[in-house]
Image (cartoon, coloured by chain):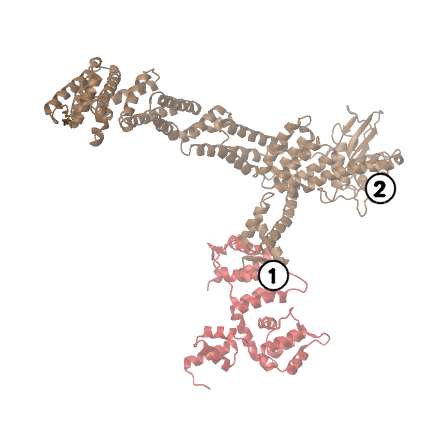
């Protein structure tokens, strides 16, 4: 059988055109160039994008990328030059519209061209570090169209003109503006900034400089600020409509600088309309506007704060230094509270609760309240007035509000210990006379004082309340046991006061009427029988009495009098006529007290249950007094010589001051000893600083007084000076 | 006797005159300080005194010579006799120095213990030695540290028994006596100020701090710190000086001080 050899099969590849055929490239480019022309001439619908894409693809593939790219640049440039000329020839307002329309066309063309040349964009262009097609198109538009010598300046002027017209109240084509601005942004942020924004800001600065000058000359402060605010809002609105958002802070800075910063001082100090006028007239809206606007410029709020502070200090200073105001402590304090309320409202409603302003207000109040050394006394008198009657019928919540306001003023006092001394005096009178409207309100205030200044500050005040409670229980016990024996004796109500807690003054014993003495002795026996080791002394200068009296025509009245007045009146049960001298001898009431006593019994119209010869205001020792049979009154109950807290006379005030100074010495010494006991060794300046720090919640210690206390402690051998360093003190255990 | 140059001999004589030391001790001090007088004084005063032997019997005799007839103490009369014997005025400041050596508790009184132990510490057991020692005691006032000790000792010595403070008149007398040695230019103004403005007793602290004030502040008060640790009375004194034009721009402006 024979074998047959198989012949191998061979297929020859299809032959392409030769690589680098210039004729091919030229021919292909012509096709593409024609297409670009058609695209720009709005005849793209007849083009085959697949064919064009393939042509571009082939050119790049066959190493004709450079020719393709160069051709593109040349062709686009020639078209843009035509476009530029077309824009330049546009008349009037058509100019912007023409730019916009051409720009839209250019972008469409650019999109198509980029799609056709996508392969080149992905390969040839990166490899050769050339500008991508789209970006190239934008750059050419910028360089050929926007930056042409005629168009560039005209475009800017046109844009600025439109802004100006809008500022002057005209309605402009914002959509068109938005498009043009967006074009500039699309060309790149630097184009926007250099071609428009910079000039816009400069022109705006000039505009607002001139406008603000005109406004400042023709408007009052409130109106000016309204205009400034409106301008600010307009610029922000303009940005939101057609400028780049990044321009907002720049243009608002311009407005702020030209309309606010440049005229801050003028505005604030404008007569009849500036900050002070706004404050005086409670122009909350204007103040708020000022705060909002001035906050936007450096030091703006500082100026507002300083002027407000200066004005508040002056106002407060006038208030606390006005001799007329000093006559009525309650009114004095009420005006302080009103002043604080007013400025709190300003800060709340107009100054956004700005902490800086709150602090400034606080330091202003602290400044002027302490200018008047009587402020502590007056605040206490205000409290006294409110707790006696001012808060009668007022709801619990409102009571708390008022007490909190009082505490606010108290906090400003630098001499809180002076307040405490007066408060104690006034509280004592309220408690002993039963005139306080509310135990709860009294205790509430004491809790606040304790919170503010510590337990030690209020411990004696609380002791006073304890005494009142204990006394009430004691009297109940007294009458429970002895009530049946009392018969027709006068009723007695005793307050047992702990020595040291109450602001007692030495009370020389006076001669009580026999009827009163009897019941007093019974109480003494009872009390000392149930409390071993106690000592009782009567404080007759602090008591009150109710007397039943029958006058000439049989009319009856109940008289509310002081204990001293009771002693005097009871004498007339058995005497027709008595001289001042005789009354003094019979009662042993000190002459100065007696004179005041008799004055209120005989010289006050409507309360003159005694008759005096001669009829004069002054009381001499030989003046004669008679029971006034002709006394009449509309009221059954007649109150005579009410013990009401009054502002001290100058000598009394001086005396209280001296007592305060005396009370401070042991406190300063105690502080020094506390400090040295813990430190063992400390230098002079640090002792002074530490003592001041420890005591300043009550009062500001005087460094000279501290120095004297140190000397006293050295003399009494609690401290000694270091042998080597004379400024160093050592504690001696 | 060593043969000395004239310069050295002069210094030796000067040292002996001032300190009352023996020639032997003087030579020792001057050689130790290389013949500088100031150094020699420092050396001399800082040397612990040799415990010179003193005859107890002689001391006893001295004490008995001056002691009071009824009280076992030397009182004012005895001190007067003592001053006579050693040829010193009772008002002389050297009596204060002597009292300091004796650790006397109070002025015009020496207990037996104070007298005898004091003289022992001075190496004195005879009137001759006592007289020899006077210049030495006087010279101790020139030493700054000893002056301070004597000054502060004077307060307790001069004040009334049982009192804490020094009576103003006594204090003024003491200041005039003491500052006659130290030449503090403001002493007269200080005394006038006290009589015009203070009129109260002087505390120990004020007394001792015044010496510091005199030394530290001297005649230049421009840097006086009124808020510093000086006693308040000194603050008031400076204020007084300024008010009366005695001090202007921190410098003394008193024509009586010009010479």
- Image vertical order of residue B94 relative to residue B233, above or below: below
Chain letter, red: B
Q: Is residue A463 left or right of residue A629?
A: left
Quarter location, residue B196: bottom right
Quarter location, residue A133: top left
Q: Residue at x 48, y 62 (%)?
A: B257
Residue that label 2 marks: A526
Q: Nearer the viewer, residue A708 or A608?
A: A708
Provide the secondary structure element on which disc 1 rests.
helix
Q: Residue at x 57, y 62 (%)?
A: B208
Where residue A542 appears, x then y in whole percent? Answer: 75, 38
Distance from Cα at disc 1 to Cα at disc 2: 54 Å
Q: Is residue A213 visible?
A: yes
Q: Residue at x 65, y 33 (%)?
A: A383
Residue that label 1 marks: B204
The subunit carrying tag 2 is A
Q: Is residue A76 visible?
A: no
Q: Nearer the viewer, residue B81 or A501?
A: A501
Chain letter, brown: A
Q: Residue at x 58, y 31 (%)?
A: A337
Q: Nearer the viewer, residue A423 or A28?
A: A28
């Amino acid at each position: 059988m024979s074998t047959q050899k198989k012949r191998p099969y061979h297929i020859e590849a299809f032959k392409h055109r030769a690589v680098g055929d210039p004729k091919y490239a030229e021919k292909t480019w012509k096709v593409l160039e024609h297409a670009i022309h058609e695209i720009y001439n709005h005849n793209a619908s007849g083009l085959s994008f697949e064919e064009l894409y393939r042509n571009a693809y082939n050119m790049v593939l066959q190493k004709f990328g450079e020719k393709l790219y160069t051709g593109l640049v040349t062709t686009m440039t020639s078209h843009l030059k035509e476009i530029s000329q077309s824009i330049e020839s546009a008349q009037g307002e058509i100019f912007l519209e023409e730019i916009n329309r051409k720009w839209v066309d250019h972008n469409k063309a650019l999109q198509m061209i980029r799609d056709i040349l996508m392969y080149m964009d992905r390969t040839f262009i990166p490899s050769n570090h050339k500008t991508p097609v789209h970006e190239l198109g934008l750059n050419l538009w910028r360089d050929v169209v926007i930056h042409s010598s005629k168009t560039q300046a005209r475009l800017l002027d046109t844009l600025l003109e439109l802004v100006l017209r809008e500022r002057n109240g005209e309605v402009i084509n914002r959509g068109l503006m938005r498009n043009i601005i967006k074009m500039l942004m699309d060309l790149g942020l630097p184009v926007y900034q250099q071609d428009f924004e910079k000039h816009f800001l400069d022109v705006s600065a000039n505009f607002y400089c001139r406008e603000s000058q005109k406004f400042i000359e023709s408007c009052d402060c409130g109106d000016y600020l309204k205009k400034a605010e409106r301008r600010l809002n307009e610029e922000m609105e303009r940005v939101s409509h057609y400028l780049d958002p990044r321009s907002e802070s720049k243009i608002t800075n311009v407005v702020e600088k030209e309309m606010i910063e440049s005229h801050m001082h003028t505005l604030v100090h404008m007569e009849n309309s500036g900050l002070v006028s706004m404050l005086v007239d409670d122009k909350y809206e204007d103040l708020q506007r000022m705060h909002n606007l001035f906050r936007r410029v450096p030091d703006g709020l500082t100026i507002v704060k300083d002027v407000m502070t200066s004005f508040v200090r002056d106002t407060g200073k006038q208030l606390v230094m006005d001799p007329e105001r000093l006559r009525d402590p309650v009114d004095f304090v009420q005006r302080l509270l009103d002043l604080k309320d007013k400025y709190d409202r300003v800060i709340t409603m107009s100054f956004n609760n700005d902490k800086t302003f709150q602090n400034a207000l606080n330091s202003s109040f602290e400044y002027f309240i302490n200018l008047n050394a009587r402020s502590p006394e007056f605040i206490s008198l205000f409290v006294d007035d409110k707790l006696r009657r001012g808060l009668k019928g007022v709801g619990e919540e409102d009571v708390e509000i008022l007490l909190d306001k009082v505490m606010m003023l108290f906090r400003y006092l630098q001499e809180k210990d002076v307040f405490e001394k007066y408060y104690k005096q006034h509280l004592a009178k309220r408690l002993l006379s039963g005139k306080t409207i509310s135990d709860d309100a009294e205790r509430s205030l004491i809790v606040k004082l304790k919170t503010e200044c510590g337990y030690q500050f209020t411990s004696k005040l609380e002791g006073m309340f304890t005494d009142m409670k204990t006394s009430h229980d004691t009297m109940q016990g007294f009458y429970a046991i002895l009530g049946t024996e009392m018969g027709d004796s006068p009723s007695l109500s005793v307050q047992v006061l702990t020595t040291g807690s109450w602001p007692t003054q030495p009370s020389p014993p006076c001669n009580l009427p026999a009827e009163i003495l009897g019941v007093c002795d019974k109480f003494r026996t009872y009390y000392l029988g149930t409390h071993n080791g106690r000592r009782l002394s009567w404080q007759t200068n602090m008591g009150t009495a109710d007397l039943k009296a029958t006058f000439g025509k049989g009319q009856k009245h109940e008289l509310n009098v002081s204990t001293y007045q009771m002693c005097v009146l009871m004498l007339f049960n058995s005497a027709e006529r008595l001289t001042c001298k005789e009354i003094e001898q019979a009662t042993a009431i000190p002459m100065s007290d007696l004179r005041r006593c008799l004055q209120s019994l005989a010289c006050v119209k409507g309360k003159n249950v005694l008759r005096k010869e001669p009829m004069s205001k002054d009381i001499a020792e030989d003046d004669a007094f008679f029971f006034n049979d002709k006394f009449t009154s509309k009221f059954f109950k007649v109150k005579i010589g009410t013990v009401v807290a009054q502002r001290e006379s100058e000598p009394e005030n001086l005396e209280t001051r001296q007592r305060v100074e005396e009370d401070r010495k042991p406190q300063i010494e105690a502080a020094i000893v506390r400090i040295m006991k813990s430190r063992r060794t400390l230098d002079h300046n640090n002792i002074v600083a530490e003592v001041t720090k420890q005591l300043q919640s009550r009062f500001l210690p005087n460094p000279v007084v501290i120095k004297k206390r140190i000397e006293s402690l050295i003399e009494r051998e609690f401290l000694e000076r270091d042998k080597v360093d004379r400024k160093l003190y050592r504690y001696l255990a | 006797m060593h043969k000395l140059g004239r310069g050295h001999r002069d210094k030796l004589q000067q040292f002996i005159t001032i300190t009352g030391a023996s020639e032997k001790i003087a030579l020792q001090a001057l050689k130790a300080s290389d013949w500088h007088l100031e150094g020699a004084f420092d050396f001399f005063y800082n040397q612990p005194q040799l415990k010179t032997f003193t005859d107890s019997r002689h001391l006893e005799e001295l004490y008995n010579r001056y002691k009071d007839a009824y009280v076992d103490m030397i009182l004012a009369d005895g001190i007067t006799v003592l001053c006579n014997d050693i040829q010193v005025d009772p008002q002389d400041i050297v009596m204060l120095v002597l009292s300091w050596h004796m650790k006397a508790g109070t002025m015009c009184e020496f207990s037996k213990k104070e007298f005898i132990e004091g003289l022992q510490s001075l190496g004195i057991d005879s009137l001759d030695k006592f007289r020899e020692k006077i210049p030495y005691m006087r010279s101790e006032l020139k030493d700054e540290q000893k002056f301070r000790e004597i000054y502060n000792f004077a307060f307790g010595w001069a004040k009334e028994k049982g009192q804490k403070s020094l009576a103003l008149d006594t204090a003024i007398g003491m200041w005039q006596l003491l500052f006659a040695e130290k030449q503090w230019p403001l002493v007269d103004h200080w005394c006038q100020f006290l009589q015009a403005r203070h009129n109260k007793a002087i505390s120990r602290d004020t007394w001792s701090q015044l010496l510091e004030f005199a030394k530290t502040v001297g005649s230049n008060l421009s840097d006086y710190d009124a808020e510093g640790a000086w006693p308040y009375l000194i603050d008031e004194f400076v204020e007084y000086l300024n008010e009366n034009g005695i001090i202007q721009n921190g410098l003394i402006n008193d024509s009586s001080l010009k010479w």
